[in-house]
Image (cartoon, rainbow, N blue to C red):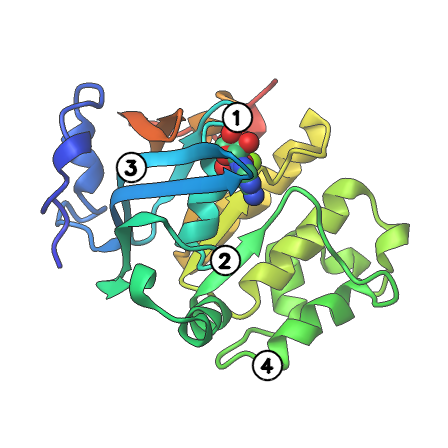
């Protein structure tokens, strides 16, 4: 599958130069990792139907750091859960490297998540009785090609706190343990749903720096889902989500260093 094919509904919507976003560093076309078409999600709550996604089209490219930006309720979490195989769409399809996740059964989705996807959520979900190193080790023990917990924690900027328990770490440090845990299996994609949502801006920036470093050093396709427009400035592409649809795609020719951001 080639980049640039079938980008239909979202092409031409972005700002000038958006086409360049499909070019890799060498100027060649980039491989599509996720291709979503007509993605629809309807939640049923008794009599009421909630349309969380309304026929969304989206491409994500190999190795990119992309921001998905939208207000609360715009469908970000629903989208990221479907991309990550935690949930399934009501209609439409999403291909992961050509593989149709919408047709996968539970077992296949579990395998897909286990081997290809790292998640970072707003809340860190660490096991309180395990140290930072042990929290990461529970993943590396079952992964196919893991880095060591020490390597993962160092990449996340936490090599000096490996033997601390979660309660002995700040929120930002706990989130960096969660990042280390997510990347330790060397996932192809890292999906981060409001990763700084529970943090003050100074701490949030340190977490964003860790994500930026992982993307640069491992080449992990990284999606940062946020409602914070300032954070989106660190991404090369910014995909705007509104009311369950992609409404715009911008390209930052000069993504900002997370260190320069303030909000
Ligand atoms: N499990 C659910 N059941 C019913 N409605 C839901 C559920 N999850 C999300 N929604 C609704 O779907 C819409 C999109 O939600 P969500 O994807 O969480 O948006 P965001 O992450 O951008 O805040 C919202 O209107 C929300 O209330
Ligand atoms: Mg959300």
The structure residue drawn at horizontal position 59% and vertical position 81%, both measured from the top left corner, is 142
| Label 3 with label 2: CB-CB less than 8 Å | no
Residue lying furthest front: 47
Decide which of tag 2 and tag 1 comes sooner along the chain: 2
- Badge 3 density bin: few <14, some 14–19, many ≥20, Cα 10 Å: many
The structure residue drawn at horizontal position 90% and vertical position 52%, both measured from the top left corner, is 168
Decide which of tag 4 and tag 2 comes sooner along the chain: 2
Ligand 1 under 8 Å from disc 1 Cβ: yes
The structure residue drawn at horizontal position 30% and vertical position 48%, both measured from the top left corner, is 91
The structure residue drawn at horizontal position 40% and vertical position 25%, both measured from the top left corner, is 243
Q: CA distance from mark 3 to mark 1?
A: 18 Å
Decide which of tag 4 and tag 1 comes sooner along the chain: 4
Residue with the mark numbered 3: 56
Residue with the mark numbered 4: 142
Residue with the mark numbered 1: 227
| Label 3 with label 4: CB-CB less than 8 Å | no
Within the image, what quadrant is residue 14 found in?
top left
Residue 70 image offset from top left, x and y in percent:
45, 26
Ligand 1 under 8 Å from disc 3 Cβ: no
Decide which of tag 3 and tag 2 comes sooner along the chain: 3
Within the image, what quadrant is residue 200 found in?
top right
Q: CA distance from mark 4 to mark 1?
A: 34 Å
Residue with the mark numbered 2: 86
Mark 2, secondary structure of its residue:
loop
Decide which of tag 3 and tag 1 comes sooner along the chain: 3
């Amino acid at each position: 599958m080639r980049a640039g094919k079938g980008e239909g509904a979202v092409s031409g919507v972005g700002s000038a130069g958006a086409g360049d976003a499909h070019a890799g560093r060498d100027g060649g076309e980039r491989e599509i990792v996720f291709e979503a078409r007509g993605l629809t999600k309807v939640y049923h709550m008794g009599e009421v139907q909630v349309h969380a996604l309304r026929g969304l089209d989206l491409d994500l490219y190999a190795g990119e750091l992309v921001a998905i930006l939208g207000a609360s309720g715009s469908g970000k979490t629903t989208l990221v859960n479907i991309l990550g195989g935690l949930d399934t769409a009501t209609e439409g399809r999403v291909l992961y490297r050509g593989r149709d996740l919408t047709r996968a059964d539970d077992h296949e989705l579990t395998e897909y998540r286990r081997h290809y996807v790292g998640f970072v959520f707003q809340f860190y979900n660490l096991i309180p009785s395990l140290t930072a190193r042990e929290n990461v080790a529970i993943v590396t023990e079952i992964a196919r090609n893991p880095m060591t917990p020490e390597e993962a924690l160092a990449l996340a900027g936490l090599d000096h706190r490996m033997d601390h328990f979660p309660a002995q770490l700040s929120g930002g440090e706990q989130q960096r343990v969660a990042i280390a845990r997510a990347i330790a299996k060397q996932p192809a994609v890292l999906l981060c749903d409001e990763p700084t949502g529970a943090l003050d801006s100074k701490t949030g920036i340190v977490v964003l720096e860790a994500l930026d470093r992982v993307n640069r050093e491992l080449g992990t396709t990284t999606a940062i889902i946020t409602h914070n427009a300032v954070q989106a400035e660190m991404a090369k592409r910014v995909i705007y989500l509104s009311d369950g649809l992609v409404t715009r795609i911008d390209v930052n020719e000069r993504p900002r260093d997370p260190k320069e951001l303030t909000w």
